[in-house]
Amino acid sequence: MQGILRFICALLFIILACSLPAVGAKPFSVSAGVESQEVFAGEPFVFQIQVQGAEHPDRPDLSHVSDFHVEFLGGQQNNSSSITIVNGKMTKNVRRGYVFSFRLTPKRSGNLTIPPIAVTAGGKRANTRAVSIRSVKPTEVEDFEFDLRLSEDTVYVGQPVKLTGIWYVGRKVKKFAVNLPVLDDSRFDAADWDMPVNPKKKDRYLRVPLNGEKTIAIKERRQLDGEPCTAVRFEKILIPRWPGTFSLPESTVSLLAVTGYRKPSAPSAFDDFFDGGFFGNFRQAVTQKFVIPSNKPEITVKALPESGRPADFTGLVGKYRISAEASPTRVKVGDPITLTLRVTGSAYLDPVTLPALEKQPALAENFKIPSEMASGAVKNGAKVFTQTVRAKHADITEIPPIELPYFDAGTGAYRRAKTDPIPLEVEATRVVTAKDAEGQSAISGTVKSELETWAQGIAYNYTDLSVLADASAGLEKWHRSPFWLAWLAGLPFIYVVALLVIVYRRRHLADPEANRRRKAYACLVRELKKLDTSGADAAETAGAGVLEALRRYLAKKLGLPPGALTLNEIEAALQKRQVDEPVIERVKGIFNTCEALAYGGIDGAGDAPAALVERAMQLARTLDRSLP
């Protein structure tokens, strides 16, 4: 009864609170804040705009913020309400707001200013105050080096050039991010380089945070100042847009490097989870933030000559070859012919487009060409286009050569790549008239078609109603039906099955914890089998996935609350269940391995992803036999 009274009182309080007039709501205003007032040039930081008095403001425009690379991180509502009671008077306070978040990266060192930002909402407008930032110039640090290299230092406008970044790592790193301002430089178009991945060495690849996104990189063993170290290499494509001599802007790697370890006076769950120092052997990593600058390579870009430029030139610069195949090569007039074109030569083929087939005179004269052109795809070092054409008449003997104009950067002259002609056999198509159709002529009444099926036609299959049998069912036939006899005989069986199901359900509901323990191993196996062990970041994914799956499994088997169990809690529970010490050591080992893969930065751990998953399954089988 008391519970019902408490519920009614709470309900009345909520209704009263909702009916109170909202007071204290602030007028429309905006403010800006930064994560830090002092940062390194090239080090990203969070910039937020807080809006009060509006729930759905328009996204602000930061295009005029010239000293920073700007990346929009998103926005969310920031509403709150509270009720205060003073001297028996109840007041409801409501706050309506919104928060925009951006990631800003200084492009240079010095005292920089984020100018006022205008925010509008519902016809209202307000400006933030200017925010001052001190950008510190990065300095070179021993044990780290960041090197940028260009595949060519002299190119033409529109000629793709490969930019390779190599980061030399001489000590353990907790977290890092790469900033390449050149990717946002208006003098260049930038694109991803499709790095080939060796499926047998997937553990060598990782995803590098670069300008707020992820890019594929490869880990290598190199030397830094004569000492062996790990190197992280990634590649991008730059396409210069206009001529001149440029120095690439300085790029940076911001990182947290481990400078040593210390033993904390009181171990915390944070140390246990991230540093792998379990069961009394706690070590807390001491880290320091560094920003490593790169060199600034120079590139000379030459203008394309006007002399000799073809009218159908599309801007391809490099050296290209083109080949063609057709299928079928024996057709009738108007039949579709699949034409496959392959363009090779340049290392970067994404900008290549299908040659304008309607501008190839010999092809356009003799073939019908669709208006929509294929986009093509890069496969095995070639850009492949598939297009359908149709022969217009029977005098065609070949598909003529198809030309691709380009500028040869090696010789400094415009050239044309050509396909070889493809022999073709085209037969005339017979025109079918109304007299060729099945049936008689409407005028003469005589049969003109060579087809002889009219005499029978659909009428040949006609039969009268005498062939139909009486299939009606009555009471006199019902008791002889095999279906109903089987149904009557099966009723006792269905009753017994239903009774067994009810008993089984009652037993399971009586002890839900036992049911969870019985299903724990099957759930773990399903989770482990779903893990992706083949992607570029498979090691990190497998480490985190195996760790979470094992935690959930052990929580069910040991009857512990679900959540982020620490290994200390798991060890104590296993010892209480009298699990053998070697098995506990295996649990500790796989937890350390998973945490190293998931949180250890680029140094990784020993197991390949697939081997780690199999190791977890073997451990679970052993634990399942040891635990009731």
Image (cartoon, grey):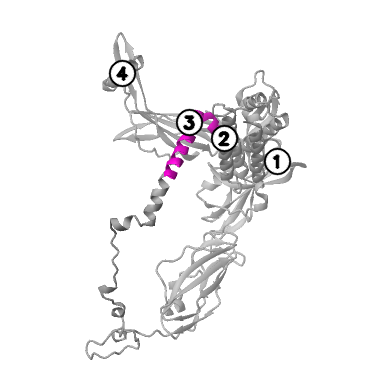
Question: How far, Cα to Cα, is label 4 from label 1?
Answer: 61 Å
Magenta stretch in the rendered image: 492-516
Residue 262 higher or lower than 406, as above or below? above
10 Å neighbourhood of mark 3: few (<14), some, or many (≥20)? few
* Image location of residue 602, percent across then percent down: 65, 40
Write the residue at 64% across / 46% down. 610
Question: How far, Cα to Cα, is label 4 from label 3?
Answer: 32 Å
Q: Are marks 2 and 3 in contact (CB under 8 Å)?
A: no
- Disc 2 versus disc 3: nearer the observer: 3
Write the residue at 59% across / 48% down. 535
Q: Are marks 1 and 3 in contact (CB under 8 Å)?
A: no
Of the two numbered discs 1 and 2 on the same chain, state the one appearing first in sequence.
2
* Image location of residue 347, percent across then percent down: 60, 60
The residue pinned by badge 4 equals 8
What type is the residue that disc 2 sits on? Arg
In the rendered structure, find residue 518 and report the number of the disc placed on it.
Answer: 2
What type is the residue that disc 1 sits on? Gly
Question: How far, Cα to Cα, is label 1 from label 3?
Answer: 44 Å
The residue pinned by badge 3 equals 509
* Image location of residue 317, percent across then percent down: 55, 63
- Towards the viewer: 301 or 214: 214
Q: Main secondary structure of the magenta part?
A: helix
In the rendered structure, find residue 606 and report the number of the disc placed on it.
Answer: 1
What type is the residue that disc 3 sits on? Leu
- Towards the viewer: 615 or 625: 625
- Helix, strand or loop at label 3? It is helix
Residue 260 higher or lower than 448, as above or below? above
- One can see residue 223 in this view: yes
